[in-house]
Image: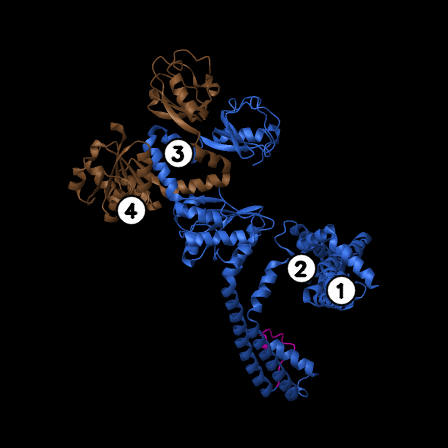
Chain colours: A brown, B blue
Amino acid sequence: MLNKTILLFGYGNHGRFIAKGLFDDGFIVKVVESNETFYHEALEDGHQDTVMIDVTKDEALQALHPETYTKLVCVMDDEHLNVFLTLSLRSLFKESYILSISDSIHTTQKLQMAGANKVIDLYEVSANKIHNILNRPIATQLLEEFVVHKNSIGFKEMVVPEGSFLESIMTDDIDFSPFGVLLVGMIDEELGHSFIFITAGVNHKIDFGDTIVCIGENDKLDLFEILIKNKEIPTDA
Amino acid sequence: MKQIFLSIALTLHASKSYKKTKDFIRDILNNSNNPYKKYVDITIIFLIVTSVVILIYEVKNPVPEWLDIYDIYFVSFVFSIEYLLRLWVHNNLTDLVVKEHKEATFLGREFSPSSVLKEGFAEKVKYMLTPTALIDLLAIFPAYRPLRVLRIFVLFRVLKLLRYTKSINQFTEVLSNKKFELLTLLFLLFFIVMTAGIAIYVLEERLNPNIESLFDALYWALVTISTVGYGDISPVTTEGRTISVLVIISGIAMISFATSVIVSAFSEKLSELKENRIIEQVNKSKSFLLVCGYGQMTKMFFRQSETHMDNYIILENSLERVEQARKDGYEAIHEDASRYHTLNKFNTEHSQITILCLTGSDVENIYITLNAKSISSKIKVIARASNSSMISKFEHAGADHILLPNMVANTMIHTAITQPTMYKAIHAILTGKSIARIDEIRAYECESIIGKSIRDLSFKRNKLLFIGIHREGEFMFNPSLEEVVKPHDILLVMGRQISLNYFKRNHGWRD
C-alpha cells in the first residue's frame, strides 16, 4: 500500500476527477486545498483526508511530510499558484516525484523549469486527440476504450518472474496470440529501463525482471500473468 | 393545343433524368463551387482567346481555311449552345405550367397555360436583356472580316471573358458600391465638357482653323479635361486660353476626386475581397477544415500538425485574433461562424467539410454546431465542451465528436499515476508518435488486401502488430489467422509510420 499514496494539491476542475479515479483504483489520496469552497466539497465527496492550508507557506507544506508520499500531484485551478507550489515543493523536497497540470501553452515550460517531473499539457493532449479523431477516428475510439473505459480490452504490464518460460526468448520469436493477448512492448532492465515497442524492429532477449506490456481481453491478461510463472510453455493455451 | 402543352409539361416535370440533367447543367454553368465548372470555363476562355488571336493574326497574314471554319462555325456553334443552355436553365417553364394546371384543377376553373407561359417567357426575355446575356448573344456572331466595321464583334468575344474573369467582376462590384460618387463625377464631367466645348465653339469657331464643328470643340474639351492634351486642337484667343486654364484646373481636381473614390472603394472592400478569395480557394477542395476560434487550443492544434495543412480556414469573431492568426502564418477570416450566411458560403454540396468548434464558450460551440447541422447534415462537427454535463447538449445539437480537454488531461494524469511505467507507451500510442502509432487500414483504400486472410498479409514481416478488425460496428480483437478481410473492414494495427505507409502503399493505397 505504501507505493499507492498520493498527495493531491487542488480539488477544482481536475482535482475532483483525479481524486475519484485514484480512489476507485485503490490509491490512498490526501487532498490539499487552499480554497475553502473546494475544501468543503472534497469533504462532502467523502475524501475525509482533506486539509486546508496556505500552500504558499513552506512550513505548512513541510507539515504535510510530502516526502512520505509516492507522488505529489499539483492540479490547482489557479495556474500561478500551481507553478509557485511546484517550485516550492521542488525546492523543499528534492527527491519527490512531482506531476503537474498545465492549463496554458506558456505554463508548461514554466512548470518544467519549476522542477516538475512530468507536466501534462491540457492543450497538447487535447489537440493530439483532435488530430487522432480527424485522421484515424475508429482507432482513436477503440484506443480510448482500451485505455480509459477498460470495458473488456486493456493494457497490462507484467514483470517476467524468475524461471518463466519467457526467459531467454527473443521478442521476434514470440507469438502470444494463442493466449488471447498481444505483446505491445517491454521494459528492458539491461537497457536502462527504457520502453521498447515490439514494432520498433529490434530483436530483444527477455530476461527475468523485465516488464512486458500486453494488450488483450482483461480476463485473458489476468490468466496470462499467472501462466508466465510456468517454466514450460503451457500446452492448453 | 393546351392538352399537348400540359402532357409535355407533366412528362418533363415527372422525369427525374430531365430534372437531373437540367440541375447538372445549371450547376456546372453557374455554381463556382462545382468541381467541373473550371473545365467549362477553361474551354470557353480557350475558344475566346483563339478567336481573338486568329483575328489579330489575320490583319497582316492570310489565314488557312480550317482556321476560318474553326472561328466562324465551331466557336460560334459552341457559343450558341452555351447561350441556349443558359437561357434554358434560367427558369422552369414546365414547373409554371404544372403549377397552373394544379391551381386550375383545385379551383375548378379552365386551364390556361398562356398566361404562365407569357410570364415564363417574360422572365427569359428579362434575362436576355441583361448585359452579360447580351454580350453572350453578340459574341456568337463571328467577326466578319471583309467588312471592317463588323470586326467589332470580336470585341464582344473579349467582353465575354468578363464572365470568366473574377478579378474584373470584383472590380466592377467594388465600383458599384461607389455608384453615387461616380455618377456625380460623370455628371460633373459632362457638364464641364459641354460648357467648355460650347464656349470654345462660340468664341473660336471663326478664328481657329482646327475647330470646324461643335464635335471638334467637345473633343478638345474632353482631351483637355482628361489632361491628355494631344495638341491637335488648341485655343488661339485669350478667352479660349482662359477657358483652357479653367478646364485644366477642374480636370486635375476631377482626376484626384476619381482616384480617391476608387482607392477608398478598394480599401473599404479589400479585406472582404481577400477573404472571399480564401473562401473560393478552399471551396475547390474535396475536403477541408473550418476551425472556429483562434485560442490556445487552435494554436496547439496547428503546432502539432505533422504536415503543412492546406485545406483549412480559421473563422474568428475578434479582429485582433484574426490579425494574430495571420501574423502566425495561418489563413484566417473575420467571420462569425454561428451566423447562417457565414457557413452557407462554403461548398457544402460538393466538399466534405469538418468543423472544429474550438472557442472557449460552450454556448458559442453549441450554436455553431447547430448552425452547421442546419445547413447540411453532411458537415462533420468536432466540438469542444468544458465539462461532461455538456455532452448530452452537444449530442442533441448533432456534434459527431465531443472533446473534453479537462477529461483528456485528467485521463493522462490518472494513467501517469496508476500505470507509470506504461505511461510513456500509452502516451506515445495516444499521441500517435512515430515509433508506435496505432492506425487504421481501411480495406477499401487498400483493395489488394480484400479477400486475403490475416495470415497472408504477413503483418509481422512488415514489422506491424495486428490488433483486430472493426467490422460492421463491432471490434474483433485478435481474430483467427484464417479470418478473411472484407471490403468494408477497418484493420487496427500498431507500428512505425514508415512501416504502416509501406504496407499500405504495397496494397494499393495512395497518399
Instruction: Kindly identify the residue that appears in the image at 20 percent across and 33 percent down.
Output: A67
Which residue carries the number 2 mark? B161
**Decide: marks 4, 1 in contact (CB < 8 A)?**
no
- How far is the residue under mark 4 from the one under mark 1? 77 Å
Which residue carries the number 4 mark? A79
Mark toward the start of the polypeptide (3 vs 2) = 2
Q: Secondary structure at mark 4?
A: helix
Q: Dot 1, how many residues are within 10 Å of its Cα: few (below 14), some (14-19), or many (20+)?
A: some
- How far is the residue under mark 4 from the one under mark 3? 23 Å
- How far is the residue under mark 3 from the one under mark 2? 57 Å
What amino acid is at disc 4? Answer: Glu
Mark 4 or mark 1, whichever is nearer to me: 4
Which residue carries the number 1 mark? B151
What amino acid is at disc 3? Answer: His
Q: Secondary structure at mark 3?
A: helix
The boundaries of the magenta stretch are: B225-236
Q: Is residue B432 visible?
A: no
In percent of width and height, residue A165 lies at 40, 13
Which residue carries the number 3 mark? B427
- Marks 1 and 2 on same chain: yes
What chain letter is assigned to the residue under label 2?
Answer: B
Residue B142 marker: none
Mark toward the start of the polypeptide (1 vs 2) = 1
Pick the quarter of the image with the C terminus of chain B.
top right
**Decide: marks 4, 2 in contact (CB < 8 A)?**
no
What chain letter is assigned to the residue under label 3?
Answer: B
Give the side of residue A200 with respect to residue B491, left or right: left
What chain letter is assigned to the residue under label 4?
Answer: A
